[in-house]
Image (spheres, rainbow, N blue to C red):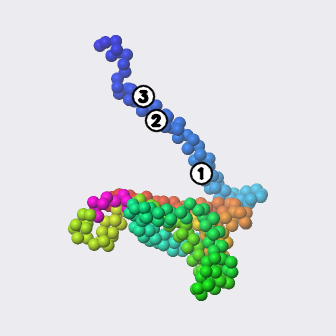
């Protein structure tokens, strides 16, 4: 054995050292992200759990009451009504968003300049803040001065002097319109990305085999879009369960508390009634619901991969 062979370490040792160094470097680069995660999520989450187990006034000394706040939540008629309305809103808005997203995605799926133009037009409302969009639509439907009420009133379709936010169904319909206008562009983009990921050869083979356009859509496009649909569905449901801004700005929970959402009720208990402990317990309960939704997402994605 030569002197050079004695000095040079085996290649396997070199590879192990390089892998170890890369692992240490990766850990060091990840530390800032872990620090931010711990500071802005893990610690507040632990703190919220602790606060939910106490009678915690905004001003005063906290008193440990165990699961008293959780027991109170299941007997709180106002919170139960708020949760019921939140689920009702979710059930109504989710199919509207998915169906429109599908339709718009198929309309703009070609790569021509005209299709790209309409992709941009449909996506533009997404860049507007939800609060800004709520104020815009609230102004549009104001009685006497709202441009929408004035225009439709001039055609005899609506009463321009009516307060449309004083009635549950008209207020609810306006909120649905605003959210659809604001969000459907993002849903369209997600569905469009899934459609563009389907090879053209698949649909061509179906046409050669005699499949109609509807059969090709239902038996080929939809199954191949299951991961995308699962993602869009969970985004829609989670966003709807966390609805707050649009109802806080446009309806303020009215009329007569009929448009109070779960998050709105948490806000009222924490920052209006100053019952921070109870608000924390309601937050934990809502987080558990969102956890179930996330688990459903993973189940849908796993099933689509195994299909």
- In which quadrant of the rendered image does the C terminus lie? bottom left
Q: Which residues are magenta?
A: 195-203
Q: Which is nearer the eye, 8 or 172?
A: 172
Rendered residue at 31%/58% (across/down): 199
Residue 20 part of the magenta segment: no
Instruction: Give the structural element (helix, strand or loop) at label 1.
Output: helix
Q: Which is nearer the eye, 281 or 155?
A: 155
Is label 2 in contact with label 1 (beta carbons under 8 Å)? no
Q: Is residue 20 left or right of residue 69?
A: left
Rendered residue at 71%/59% (across/down): 56
The x and y percentages for residue 61 are 76, 56
Relative to 127, is 166 above or below?
below
Which mark is first along the chain, 3 or 1? 3
Residue most extreme to the top: 3
Q: Which is nearer the eye, 306 or 95?
A: 95
Instruction: Give the structural element (helix, strand or loop) at label 2.
Output: helix
The x and y percentages for residue 296 are 45, 62
Q: Which mark is residue 23?
A: 2
Residue 80 in view of the camera: no
Which mark is first along the chain, 1 or 2? 2
Q: Is residue 219 left or right of residue 189?
A: left
The residue that label 3 is drawn on is 17
Relative to 232, is 147 above or below?
below
The residue that label 1 is drawn on is 41
- What is the C-alpha distance between the residues marked 3 and 2? 10 Å
């Amino acid at each position: 054995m030569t002197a050079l062979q004695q000095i040079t370490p085996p290649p396997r040792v070199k590879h192990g050292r390089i892998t170890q160094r890369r692992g240490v470097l990766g850990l060091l680069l990840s530390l800032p992200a872990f620090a931010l995660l711990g500071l802005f999520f893990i610690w507040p989450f632990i703190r919220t759990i602790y606060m939910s187990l106490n009678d915690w006034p905004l001003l005063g000394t906290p008193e440990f009451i165990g699961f008293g706040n959780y027991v109170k939540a299941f007997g709180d008629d106002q919170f139960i009504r708020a949760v019921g309305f939140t689920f009702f809103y979710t059930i109504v808005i989710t199919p509207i968003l998915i169906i429109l997203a599908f339709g718009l995605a198929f309309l703009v799926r070609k790569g021509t300049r005209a299709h790209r133009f309409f992709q941009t037009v449909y996506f533009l409302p997404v860049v507007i803040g939800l609060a800004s969009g709520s104020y815009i639509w609230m102004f549009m439907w104001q009685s006497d001065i709202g441009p929408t009420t004035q225009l439709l009133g001039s055609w005899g379709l609506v009463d321009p002097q009516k307060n449309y936010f004083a009635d549950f169904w008209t207020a609810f319909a306006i909120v649905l319109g605003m959210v659809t206008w604001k969000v459907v562009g993002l849903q369209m983009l997600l569905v469009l990305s899934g459609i563009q990921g389907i090879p053209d050869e698949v649909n061509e083979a179906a046409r050669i085999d005699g499949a109609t356009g509807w059969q090709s859509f239902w038996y080929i496009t939809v199954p191949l879009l299951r991961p995308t649909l699962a993602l869009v569905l969970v985004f829609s449901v989670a966003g709807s369960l966390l609805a707050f801004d649009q109802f806080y700005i446009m309806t303020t929970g009215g009329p007569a508390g009929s448009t109070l959402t779960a998050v709105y009720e948490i806000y009222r208990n924490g920052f209006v009634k100053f019952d921070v402990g109870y608000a924390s317990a309601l937050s934990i309960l809502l987080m558990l619901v969102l956890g179930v939704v996330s688990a459903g997402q993973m189940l849908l994605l796993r099933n689509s991969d195994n299909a």
